[in-house]
Image: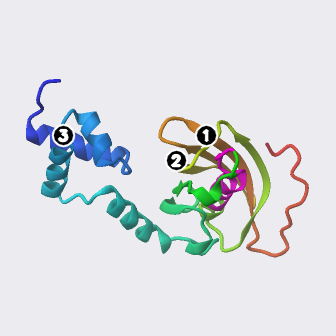
Amino acid sequence: MARIHKKIRQGLLQEKLEASPFLTDEELAGLLGVSIPTIRLDRLELGIPEVRERTKQMAENVQSKLKTLDSGEIVGELIDLELGRAGISILKITSDMVFEKTKVARGHYVFSQANSLALAVIDAPVAVTGVANIKYKVPIHIGEKLIAKAEVMKKRGNKYFVWVKTRNNKQEVFRAKFIIVSLENQEHVIGDMKGDF
């Protein structure tokens, strides 16, 4: 690969991080065909913190927007939130989250990440999960970083239709479609939701 001029490389670095802010220095070096120290120097010159600090800053900026949940109730780390529209969270699978024998992640952690994210994106002070249609696509193992993205697909009355897609660094591993019900007025009940999907 031909050497890229520094200004062009730094512009590409910024573009890559805007599109995917969780790229590590190693991943950026591979994408841009340069050494890891070159990436670190470019980041320093541009005032871009390392991935851990970027993630932390994003999480801190998002916490104040939450309406339905407290920040401690989110499973994973909430790093982006547009109330009523979309959100992103990250969950790293640790040894206490897997089955001892198979080392495969317990499903309730993956579901909880998606469900708490779906609740977090709802622009309402009180909301509950009315329906969940889920699919585990591949086994998840220790050390995998799961990035869940939620999107409000539509709103009908007090019901929000939220889709959540969860990926590891290679592929989609889980997906869920939720109907989240806003209970702003306690008169609203979940009721019969057959046929809503």
Name the front one of labels 2 and 1.
2
Query: Which x, y percent locates residue 165?
Result: 60, 44
Range covered by the magenta-colored residues: 102-116
**181 lies left or right of 27:** right
> Which residue sits at x=10%, y=42%?
7
Q: Could you tell me which secondary element the residue under label 1 belongs to?
A: strand
Q: Name the residue tied to disc 1.
A: 173
Dominant SS of magenta comes to helix
| Camera-nearest residue between 17 and 98 | 98
Q: Could you tell me which secondary element the residue under label 2 belongs to?
A: loop
* Circles 2, 1 touching at the beta carbon (< 8 Å): yes
> Which residue sits at x=89%, y=60%?
191
> Which circle's residue, 3 or 2, is located before the other in the chain?
3
**The residue under label 2 is which amino acid type?**
Glu
Q: Name the residue tied to disc 3.
A: 35
Q: Name the residue tied to disc 2.
A: 144
Query: Which x, y percent locates residue 54?
Result: 34, 60
Name the front one of labels 3 and 1.
3
Q: Could you tell me which secondary element the residue under label 3 belongs to?
A: loop
> Which circle's residue, 3 or 1, is located before the other in the chain?
3
Query: Which x, y percent locates residue 164?
Result: 62, 48
